[in-house]
Image: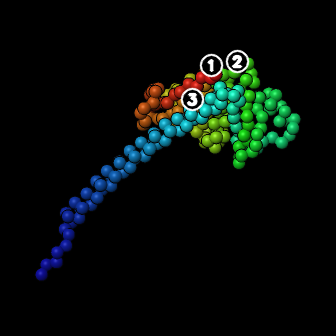
Amino acid sequence: MKSKGFTLIELLVVLAILIILAVLALIAYNKFIKVADCAGFKDQHRKVVNLAKETYGFCSLNGETYMNITAPCMTNSNGIRALKRNSGMTQVRQDGNKCVRKWDCNFRSGENAGRSSGWFVTHARAEFNTPNHTGGFIREDQWQNFRKPNYPERPGITNIREKGAKMEIATYLGPNCSGGNFTNSAGSYLIDEITWP
């Protein structure tokens, strides 16, 4: 009696089918990761824009808002007075690694979103708990440089910068994402301009 087993051809056919299924699964997985990354970058951009609108919205309501910083609050009374005198900031409390500070929106005459964009960058880094070095996702590069092809070097970077009286918030989505409102040879960007007051 002859034993029934798989022939070499049958084993090779099964192996080929498994390899094809593995390749298809890998392609689908990579596509899923790219779609998820794009959605994450768009959501990140929306959160930063919403923070800006909320922050400057308080200025319109009562003339003051929060401009927090990732640092311990000062304890030196001379430093606290100098902070208020030089920037219109008043420390409120320490909240974890963040110093909560109120800002007088009318501290300087002719104040606008563009002039205060540096303070907002610090505030956004504190609120999103992202470092102020290149490992973080918030940058403060020149807006025209940020839009140049091959810069920034990685998708998901959000740039906040003065653009005249306005503040520009731009997020680089990368070459594999669609749905931005500015595109060049490097890929797609989401860009919003914040105007205040």
- Please say if the residues under marks 3 and 2 sit with CB atoms less than 8 Å apart: no
Q: Which type of secondary structure does the marked residue at label 3 adopt?
A: strand
Name which of mark 1 and mark 2 comes first in the sequence: 2
Q: Which residue is mark 1?
A: 164
Give residue 50's position: percent from left, percent from top. Answer: 56, 34
Classify 10 Å Cα crowding around label 2: few (below 14), some (14-19), many (20 and above).
few
Q: Quadrant of residue 193?
A: top right
- Closer to viewer: mark 1 or mark 2: 2
Which numbered disc flags the more N-terminal residue, 3 or 1? 1
Cα–Cα span, label 3 and label 1: 13 Å
Residue 130's quadrant in the figure? top right
**Residue drawn at (87%, 38%), measured in percent from left and top?**
77
Q: Is residue 147 visible?
A: yes
x, y percent for residue 63: 70, 27
Tag 3 residue = 169
Find the residue positioned furthest to the bottom: 1
Residue identifier under label 2: 110
